[in-house]
Structures are given as structure tokens and as C-alpha cells.
Amino acid sequence: QVQLVESGGGLVQAGGSLRLSCAISGRTFSAYSMGWFRQAPGKERDLVASISWSSGNTFYADSVKGRFTISRDNAKNTVYLHMNTLKPEDTAIYYCAVKAAILSGYGNWGQGTQVTVSS
């Protein structure tokens, strides 16, 4: 069973930076890609960024392009989300998840980490 644990959230002023980490544990782990999602109060959970586990190809939502960077450390089974120039609208609970295969959905959700950006 794959488990994901997010960390690195917190309170930051607008314009600041944070780095989120997603630690992946389990006897065996393989994935097609990893994704970072966020959910603000009263809103749906949206994909923010994703990265192919093998190739490193990345995807970013338009709202975070140029400000967020997703990266992975295959040896440490960890995925990161580097967030710069944070805005109050980035305030949300951030989750990571695994996409096991190209046609599968995301799953194995972590518990999430709260990011709050003050104006």
C-alpha cells in the first residue's frame, strides 16, 4: 500500500515562498506521474502541477505557471512543489497524489498541508 505524506505548508505573506514536500512510502512504488492538487474552502480540488515519474515532463495550471515548480527525487521517493511569488488566492489545502498508469486517475491521497497567504 502506497502512502503519501505532505509537509511544508504554513502561513506566508504575499510575495513569499514555500516548498512543499510529498514523501512516498510503500513496499514497492511505481507511478506514471505525481500530481499536486489544491482545494480552497467551498471550491473543488484542482490539479496545480504534475510530473512524469520517468521522464520528468511537467504540467502546470495556468494560474501557477511561472511561479510554481514541481520536481522529484526518485532516489528519495519524494516530490516537491516550489512556490514563489505567492498570492492570497493560492491559499488552500495542498494534496499530492499518484497516477498509477496513463489511463488511470489520481489516487492514494495524502492528508494535505495547509498553505495560507496573507495580503
Image (tube, rainbow, N blue to C red):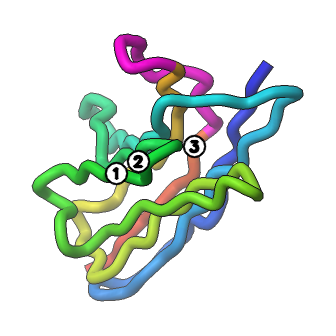
From the image, which quarter does the N terminus lie in? top right
Task: Report the residue at 19% width, 50% height from top.
Answer: 61
Numbered label attached to residue 118: none
x and y, in percent, of residue 85 in the image: 27, 82
Q: How far apart are marks 1 and 2 (CA)?
A: 6 Å
Taking depth in this image into account, of 73 and 48 the one nearest to the observer is 73
Relative to 10, is 109 above or below? Answer: above
Task: Report the residue at 46% width, 36% height from top.
Answer: 33
Taking depth in this image into account, of 33 and 44 the one nearest to the observer is 33
Which callout, 1 or 3, points at the residue further toward the start of the chain? 1
Relative horizontal placement of residue 3, taking residue 44 as reference (left or right):
right
Q: Which amino acid does label 1 sit on?
A: Asn
Residue pointed to by mark 3: 112
Most extreme residue toward the right is 27
Residue pointed to by mark 1: 57
Q: Which amino acid does label 2 sit on?
A: Ile
Q: Can residue 81 be seen in this view?
A: yes
Residue pointed to by mark 2: 51
Magenta residues?
A: 101-111
Q: Distance between the residues labelled 1 and 3?
A: 24 Å
x and y, in percent, of residue 89 in the image: 22, 61
Q: How far apart are marks 2 and 3 (CA)?
A: 18 Å
Which callout, 2 or 3, points at the residue further toward the start of the chain? 2
Mark in front: 2 vs 3: 2
